[in-house]
Amino acid sequence: MIQRKVFKLKLPSRTLLLDERTLVMGVLNVTPDSFSDGGKFFRTGDAVKAALAMQRAGADILDIGAESTRPGSAGISVEEELQRLLPVLRALRGRLKIPISIDTQKAGVAEVALAAGAEILNDISGLKNDPRIAEVAARFGVPLILMHMRGTPRTMQKQPFAKDVVNDVARGLRQAVAMARRAGVRKSQIILDPGIGFGKNFAQNYELLAKLPALAKLGYPLLVGTSRKGFLGATLARDGKPAPAEERIWGTAATVTASILQGAHIVRVHDVGEMAQVAKVADCLPHPQLRPKNTAR
């Protein structure tokens, strides 16, 4: 396990400490078409129940997305995204005790969501889709998650993959950070996500997990999301068919453990209760320099 640098994220309601304990971000998709759970929480009542259940199961952050970003997906309008998102935010206000992150690529959605109680912005496009998200984050003073994506959700698995994935991701994240800083986002409020599954082939996803320390050298906390993703389905395939999303939990557990041991501060997952246990155990592994010497021979 590598030594993780300690960071503090300033939220409107609290300070999140990123240190020896990995934070678990629960995924709540209020969409009809997400790759893993599309339609399951599309109704407001179902979404609220799921959010509260994730909180009870040990989530530290709830990440709500109202637009599917599965491979091949098309975007939706600001109006439609808000129609899906706002009823859930309003229903959770005063009931949810953990902070809410909004998974959006649109400044218009980000601004309204923050005004409705969200406290973190998560932009999977790394400011490529709508750079004004950084201005919104700076104005509200909230943390901004910048993810690397090669292409767009519609094209990311169809165009050529990078020859050197680690350098490609590092370069893209540096560019996103520069844009955010120019817009006024404080360095201490930026989190980086290598974008597992977003414009990478299956082998490259594993390479990124193994080489997370290289991305940690950029100087920002790392968030990693491997939960139920396609590369796990391919790895766990039987009879030539990828394992369905609901059967990828143990593969997810392995990659969550790997992410933590390689320096991730936050893991983004669907199966909160199980992955909270995985994180708690992985966090117990001592850092190499802290291991007691065994003098018994």
Image: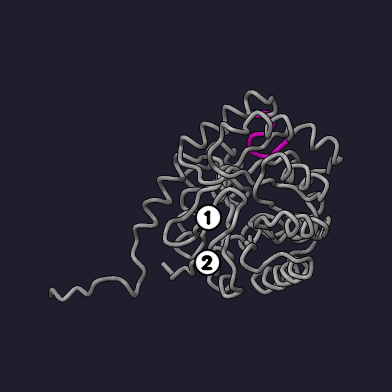
Residue at the (44%, 41%) spot, across then down: 274
Which circle marks residue 210 in the picture?
Answer: 2
Decide: is 151 above or below 92: below
Which circle marks residue 271 in the picture?
Answer: none
| Quadrant assignment, res 198 | bottom right
Label 1, secondary structure: give it: strand
Q: Main secondary structure of the magenta part?
A: loop
Residue 76 image point, x, y percent: 84, 40
Residue 238 image point, x, y percent: 55, 42
Residue 294 image point, x, y percent: 19, 73
Total labels drawn: 2
Q: In the rendered structure, which amino acid carries the disc numbered 1?
A: Leu
Crowd class of label 1 (few under 14; some 14 to 19; many from 20; radius 10 Å): some
| Quadrant assignment, res 26 | top right
Q: Which is more toward the observer, 89 or 237?
A: 89
Residue at the (47%, 59%) spot, across then down: 260
Quadrant of the image containing the N terminus: bottom left
Q: Which residues are magenta?
A: 32-41
- Say which residue label 1 marks: 16
Closest to the camera, between mark 1 and mark 2, is 1
Q: In the rendered structure, which amino acid carries the disc numbered 2?
A: Ala
Label 2, secondary structure: give it: helix
Question: Is residue 33 found inside the magenta-colored segment of the image?
Answer: yes
Residue 280 image point, x, y percent: 39, 50
Q: Which is more toward the observer, 161 or 173?
A: 173
